[in-house]
Amino acid sequence: MERDVAEDKAWSTSAETTWCPGCGNFGILAALRQALIAARLDPWQVVIVGGIGQAGKVAQYAGANFLHGLHGRAIPHALGVKFANPELKVIAVGGDGDMYGEGGNHLLHAFRRNPDIVCLAHNNGVYGLTKGQAAPTSSLRFTTKHREAGTHMPPFNPLAAGLAMGGSFIARGFAGDQKHLSRLIGEALEHRGFGFIDILQPCVTYNHVNTAEWYRKRVYDLELESHNPLDADVARARILEWPAPGDDVEIPIGVFYRSRRPAYETCGRPGQAITGLEFDAGVVKKAMEEFR
Amino acid sequence: MSELSIVITGRAGQGLQVISRTLGRMLVRAGYYVFVTQDVMSRIRGGHNFARVRVSSGPVAADGDKAQVLVALDPALVARHLPDLAEDAVVVTEAPAELPAGMNAVVIPLADLAREHGEDPVMANAAAVGATLALLGLELDGTEEMFENQFAHKGNEVVKRNVAAVRAGFRAVEDDHKRCCSHRLGTPAHGLGHDPKLPGSFGHVPRHVLISGSEAIALGAIAAGVRVVTGYPMSPATPIVAYCFGHAQEAGLIVEQPEDEVSAANLAIGAAFAGARAMVCTAGGGFCLMNEALSLDGMTEVPLVLCVGMRPGPATGMATRTAQADVLFSIYAGHGEFPRAVLTPADAGQAFLAAQEAFRIAWKYQTPVFILFDQFMADSLWTVEEDDLRTENRQGRQERQASEPMEAYSYRRYKPTESGVSPMLVPGTPEQLVYADSDEHTEEGHITESAATRDLMVNKRNSKLHGIRQELGEVKVEAEVEAETLVFCFGSTRGVVAEAVARLQKKGHKVAMVHLRYVWPFPAEAVAGLVTKGKKVVTVEQNHTGQLAQLLLQEWGLRVDGIVRRYDGRPFTVGEVESELEKMMGVGNG
C-alpha cells in the first residue's frame, strides 16, 4: 500500500517539539519520517534510540517506539535492542557531542561490529542544549562565549574514522537538502549492517560560522560526480576533502563508501527474537553433569 | 567425623585450579563433603598460588585449620607452607625437601610420569591427584567418567591422557609409598549418603556436585531464562561470563564482551527493554562505570540483573582477592532515587537460588536487582546437593501484559497502579508503541516538566520497594538457642561464622548467627524482632568501616557492641572469628 507522508497519521506524535524555530532538526525529522514511510514500515516495527541533547529528542518526536536514554549511549542501547529482537528496525540518533564525544568509543566499535542499525549523527559543530560550547566537530579556532580564544584542536572526521574501523556504510547528508537526506536514510535502512550518516546541520542560535547559507554554497552531491562507493581508495580521498582548514572548501555529501559484510547480530547468533518467556529446564540438568 | 585438609601449591600456569577441582570431585564421588578455596596472585605465569581442599564426612563451608597433606608442584615452595601444616603432615613433591621431624616426604617424579603417560609435562597435576588419592587410601573407580564429564569438549585424547596420568601417579604411591601416610580416609561410614544400590562409581550415583560460586550464579541465571549476558573482563566476575560463553549455544544465550563497562550495562538495558532477560557482570571498579546506566535503569523501569563482584579497593586494590566493602556503594549507587534489591548469597547453593530470585524480582518490579558477591564466594568450590539446586517453576508468572484486546496505539508504559508496577509490553507488539524515557515522563512516556506528574512518577517508582520487601521474605536466627549474643553477617562469611559460632556454643557460650542473604531493602523489621532487650549484637564483615553495622544503625537505630573485621584481601578463618567473638563476649559469658 502506498502512503502519503502528509496524510500518514500513524507517523505523528502528541509530543510538542522544543527545538528553536529554524532548527535543522526539523528537516532531519521530516526526512527520517519520509524514509520510514517509503520503507513501508509501521511505527510499531521501529525503535528509535536517542541520546541526550537536541538531536536525541528525535526519538520522542518521530512517532515510533523509543528509548530516550543517555548522552553518548544510543549505540549500546540500539545494539541491545537488536540482540533481543533482530526483526525490529533500529535507529540510533544523537548529536555530535553524543556520537563523537561522549559516545566516541561506542561509535568506533560499532563500525567494527557492523550491527544492522542505522546511525544518524546530527553534526552542527556546537553544543546546543548546554548553550553553545565547542563540539568535537567544531572547526579549529572556533570561538564560543565560553572560550573566546577558540578551540585548539582540529575537528574530528567521523567518516575517516569509520573507514579506518571497517565501516560498511559511510555517508554524509545535509539537513538543508531534505529530499537527498531522506533518500540517504532510505539506503541506510536497506543496508544490512551499520548504516552511518553524518548529517550537516546549521545551528541558528550558536553556530554563526557554519550557517545554512555557508553549507549550501559548499556542498555537492557525490553521485553527480560518478563517485564509486565500492572503491575504498577513492572514498578515502573524498572523505579527506572536508573538514579542512579555511573557508574556500567544498563539502561532498552522499554515500562515500559501502561494502557487504555480515551484520553482527547474525554472526553465530540465534538470528531471531529471543524475547519469548519459554524455557527448557533440561539445559540446567545437563549442565549439572559437568560438576559431578 | 573424619576430616583433613590438603594444600596444593605451585606457580601460576601449573594448572592448580584444574587439579584442585579434579581432586575435589574425586573426593565428593568417594562420599565426602569438600570445600576448595583458591589463593591466587594477579599474574599470568610464575608467582606463588595455592588451593586448599578441605575434606570431611560432614558438611563444610569454610577453610580448615592445619593441613595434613601438602602437594607441591614446585618443590621450592614447600618451605613457605610448613607453618600451615600439621606436625605429622605428608608432603608430596618431586625432589627431596627438608622437613621438620614428624613429617614425611613422598618423592615422586611427577613430571616424568606425566611425560611418559600423559604425553605432556603439564599432566603432572593429574599424576599428583592420583598420588594423593592413593596416599589417602582411596580407589580410582569412576575416574574415566569424571574426566569425560569434565573434558568432553576437549576430545577423547585429552580424557585418555588425563586418566593415564592419574593412574600413573596412583601406582607410584601404591608401589613405593603405600604406608607413608597415616591420614587415611577410606570410604566414609556416613558422608554424603549416596545410595549404594544404584550403579555408578563406588557403587553409587553422586547426588552432590562440586561447583564454584560463579558457576552457580551463571547456571542460576540460565535456569531463570537469561538470554543476554554482557560483561567486560574483570576479576572476580570474569568466570561468570566465561561460563556463559561456554554454554551459549545450548542455553540459547547471546554473550557479549563489548568495548567497555559503560557499553556492557547499556547494552543489557537495551536488550531488556526490547524483551530479553538480560544480565550484566562486573566487579566494583567496573560497576563504578555503570552508575549512570543504573540510574537510567531505575528511571526507565527496565528490569535488569547486575552481578557485582567485590574485591579489595579503592581503585585497582587487590585484583584477585576478596572483600565485602561495596555494600553501601551498591545500595546507594546511581544518582537520583529509585528502588532496587541487593542480594548477598552465602555460597554456591544460595547463589543458584539468588540468581533466579534476582530475575524474578527484577522482572516483577521492573527495576535493577543486584547479586552482590565476593571473590571468595565466586572462586571457591562448594559441595551442594543437587536437589537443593531447584529450578523455579515460572509457569503462570505474569511478566508481561496479557495480549488482551487493546485499542490500537493506546498503550501507556508508565500507567500508575497501586503497586507502582505498570503492565509491561515490549517494542514490536503490533499496533502498540512502547516508550522508555530517561527524562521525567508522562504515563505514556513522553518528556515532561509538570510538577504534578513529577510527584506522581517519583512516588510510583519508589513505592515498588514495598512489594520487593514483601517478596524477599524472612530473616531468621540460625540454630536458635537461648542466645545472649547475636552475630550478624551477610554474603560469603556465613560458612566461617556458622562454624565459629558452633564451636563457641560447644564451649557453652549463648551465641547464635543471623545471616542476611539480602541487605536491601534492609530487613529492619525482621531484625528488630530478633534482637530483644539485653541481647548483644556483633557483626562480622570483610571491610574496614563496618558497613553492615552502619546499616543496622541507620535502618533500625541500633549501635552494635562490636565488629569483627578483616580487610587484608584474605578470607576469614574459623579460628580468628571464634577468638575475636570470644573476646567480645567477655569471660564468664558462657
Image: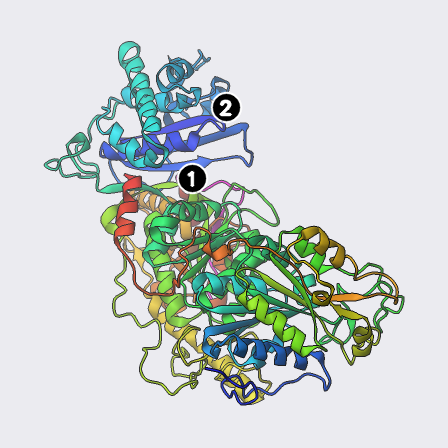
The number of numbered discs placed on residues in the rendered structure image is 2
Q: Of callouts 2 and 1, which one flags the residue occurring earlier in the amino acid sequence?
A: 2
**Range drawn in magenta:** B557-575
> Which x, y percent locates residue B83?
46, 25
Question: Taking the image as drawn, is residue B473 in sight?
Answer: yes
Q: Which residue lies at the image location 57% right of the left edge and 76% below the top edge?
A: A35
Identify which amino acid the numbered label 2 is placed on.
Arg
> Which x, y percent locates residue A183?
62, 73
Q: Which residue lies at the image location 36% right of the left edge and 54% below the top edge?
A: B252
Q: Magenta-highlighted stretch: main secondary structure? A: loop
Question: Taking the image as drawn, is residue B561 in sight?
Answer: no
Per the rendering, the mark at residue B80 is 2
**Which of the 4 image quadrants contains residue B154?**
top left
Identify which amino acid the numbered label 1 is placed on.
Thr
Per the rendering, the mark at residue B546 is none
Residue pointed to by mark 1: B573
